[in-house]
Amino acid sequence: MHISPHIIIILLSCIVILSYLFNMVSRKTRIPSVLLLIGTGIGIKYLSGYYGYVEQDVARLVKILGTTGLIMIVLEAALDIVLRKDKLKLVRDSILSASVSFVISAFSIAWLLSRWLNQPFHFAFLYAVPMSIISSAIVIPSTSHLPQMKKEFIVYESSFSDILGVMVFNYMLMDNVMSYHSLGIFVGNLGLAIVISSIASLMLIYMLTRMTMNLKFFMIFAVLALVYSAGELISIPSLLIILVFGLLLNNSSLLFRGRFKHQATPGFMEDTLNLMRSITAETAFLIRTFFFILFGYSIKIELLIVPQVILLGSVIVIILFIIRFLYLRFVLRANLLPELFLMPRGLLTILLFYSIPAEKSMNNFSIGILFFVVVATSIIMMLGLLFCKTPAPAGNEPAGENPIQTTLFPFN
C-alpha cells in the first residue's frame, strides 16, 4: 500500500512530539519514557496490521540506530562526569559494582541457559553477556530527580557496564576463546584502544579549539562515529574512545595547564561544552525515540506469553535482582533504594543480541526471552522509582555518609 511522503513526515513529527510528551509524563510520574515508547511501537505494529499494511523487518534499522544511539548516550554521560580527587571513591565503587555484578550475572545466566536449553556453555555465555549489561540508555534519563552523587554513581556504573559488556562480547566472538593466543590478542586490542582513545580525543579537542566555523559539532560526531565503527571492525573496544573524549573535554582544565593554558580559555571551553551537551542530548533523545519505537514494533507479543519464555525469563530476572541485592548489601554496604531497582536491560542488550553470528547461535533460544527480560527489568525500575521516596539532596547529607546511600533501610 502506497503512503504519501507528507503522511510519513506527519507521522515522524508526531512520534517526536509524542516522545517529548512522554518525557514530561515520565518526570511527573517516574514511569520510564522508554516503556511508553516501546508500548507505542507495539501499538503502531498492530494498528498498521489492522489497516492492512504489511509488517516490515526493522532489525537492520534497529541495529544502525542502536549503534548511533550508543555513541551519543555514552558521550552524553561522559560530558556530565567531573574528575576530582573527592570522587575517586565514587568512581571505584561504581566501577566495581558494574564489574562484579556483570561477571557473576553472565556466568550465572550462562550456566542456567546451558543446562535449561542443553547448549554448549560458550554459546550460552555469548547470550548471557547482553542480558548482564545495565542499560545506560534507559537508566540515565530516569535519574534526573536523584541527588547528584546518586546520579553520578548510576552514570559511572551503567557506562562502564556498557563498555565492559562490549569488550567481553567481542572477545567471545573470537575463535578458541580459552587459548592464550586469543587472550593475548584481546589484551593487545585493549591496550591499542586506550592508546587510540587518548590520541583521537586529544586531536578532536585540539580541532575544537582551532575551528572557527559554526558547523563543527556534527563533524566531530562524524569523526567519533567513524573511529568507533572502524574500531569495531577490527574488534577493539572502541567505546572507550567515546568515553575518554567526553571525559577529557569535560575536564579540559586538567589538560590545558602551564604553557598550554592559552590554547583554550575557560570561557571558550565552557561555551563549547554547553553547546555540545545541548546538541548531544537532543540527538541522543531523537535516536533513542526511534530506536525504542522500532524495538516495540519488532516485539511479537505472542512470544511473551509462551510458558517457557515466562518461566526462563523470570528466573533470569530473579538472578539479576538477587546478585544486585547481595552486592549492594554485603559488598558495597550501601542502603538499597532506589539503586537496587535501577538495573534495566535495553539498547545495548538488543544491539548485541542482533550481532550474534549464525554459527554461534542457539536455535532453541526464543527471542521472546530477550523481550521479556528487557520489559521486566524496565518495569522493576519503574516500580522502584515510583515507590521509593526521593532522598535528600547530596549537599544535605550528613558528613561521612556513603554518598550513594539513602535514608531508607539504614543497614550500616
Image (tube, rainbow, N blue to C red):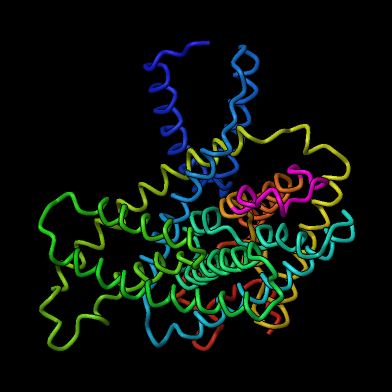
Give the residue at x 37% y 83%. 84
Give the residue at x 36% y 75%. 82
- Count the marks: 0
282, above or below 40, in the image:
below
Of 195 and 340, which appears nearest the observer? 195
Query: On the rendered structure, is 47 left or right of 225?
Result: right
Query: On the rendered structure, is 119 left or right of 394?
Result: right
329, above or below 121, in the image:
below
Q: Is residue 254 magenta?
A: no
Instruction: Please state the horizontal and vertical placement of residue 142, each as a whole percent of the image.
Output: 52, 55
Instruction: Please state the horizontal and vertical placement of residue 374, each as a whole percent of the image.
Output: 67, 49
Query: On the rendered structure, is 316 left or right of 348?
Result: right
Give the residue at x 41% y 32%. 17
2, above or below 196, in the image:
above
- Quarter location, residue 266: bottom left
Q: Quadrant of the C terminus?
A: bottom right
Of 130 and 51, which appears nearest the observer? 130
Give the residue at x 42% y 63%. 77
Instruction: Please state the horizontal and vertical placement of residue 46, each as a whole percent of the image.
Output: 65, 23
Of 199 and 188, which appears nearest the observer? 188
Of 41 and 243, which appears nearest the observer? 243
Q: Is residue 367 magenta?
A: yes
Q: Tell me where the magenta segment starts and ends, as one range.
A: 352-368
- Quarter location, residue 220: bottom left
